[in-house]
Image (cartoon, rainbow, N blue to C red):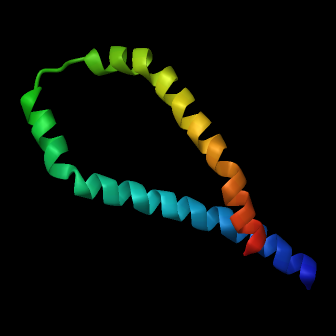
């Protein structure tokens, strides 16, 4: 009984966190939709410049995001252990 509840908790917490992140992304997209549409309208002929920008800016941004995520892991794990 206790082992089953522990396994269920270990499955539900990451699943809930994943849904929370997904909803946060959707809310952010909805909140900034007008700004995004204006940006797309301002640069209609951008072409393949986004591929070059992604290759140049992608790795540093991924590194910064991963460092931020790792910094938040200890407080998040304490919250999971308390719950």
Residue 1 relative to residue 76: left or right: right
Residue 35 relative to residue 53: left or right: left
Residue positioned 91% across, 82% down in the render: 2
Q: Position of residue 27 (x, y in %)?
A: 33, 60
Residue positioned 75% across, 72% down in the render: 82
Residue 16 relative to residue 37: left or right: right
Q: Position of residue 23 (x, y in %)?
A: 42, 62
Residue positioned 72% across, 52% down in the render: 74
Q: Quadrant of residue 77?
A: bottom right
Residue positioned 41% across, 20% down in the render: 57
Residue 23's place in the image compared with 28, above or below, is below
Residue 64's place in the image compared with 31, above or below, is above
Q: Position of residue 62 (x, y in %)?
A: 52, 30
Which residue is most to the bottom? 1
Q: Position of residue 8 (x, y in %)?
A: 77, 74
- Of the 4 image quadrants, the one containing the C terminus is bottom right
Closer-to-camera residue (1/60)? 60
């Amino acid at each position: 009984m206790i082992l089953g509840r522990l396994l269920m908790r270990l499955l539900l917490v990451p699943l809930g966190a994943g849904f929370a992140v997904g909803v946060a992304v959707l809310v952010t997209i909805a909140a900034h939709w007008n700004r995004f549409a204006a940006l797309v309208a301002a640069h209609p002929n951008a072409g393949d410049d986004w591929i070059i920008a992604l290759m140049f800016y992608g790795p540093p941004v991924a590194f910064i995001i991963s460092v931020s995520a790792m910094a938040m892991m200890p407080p998040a794990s304490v919250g999971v252990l308390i719950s």
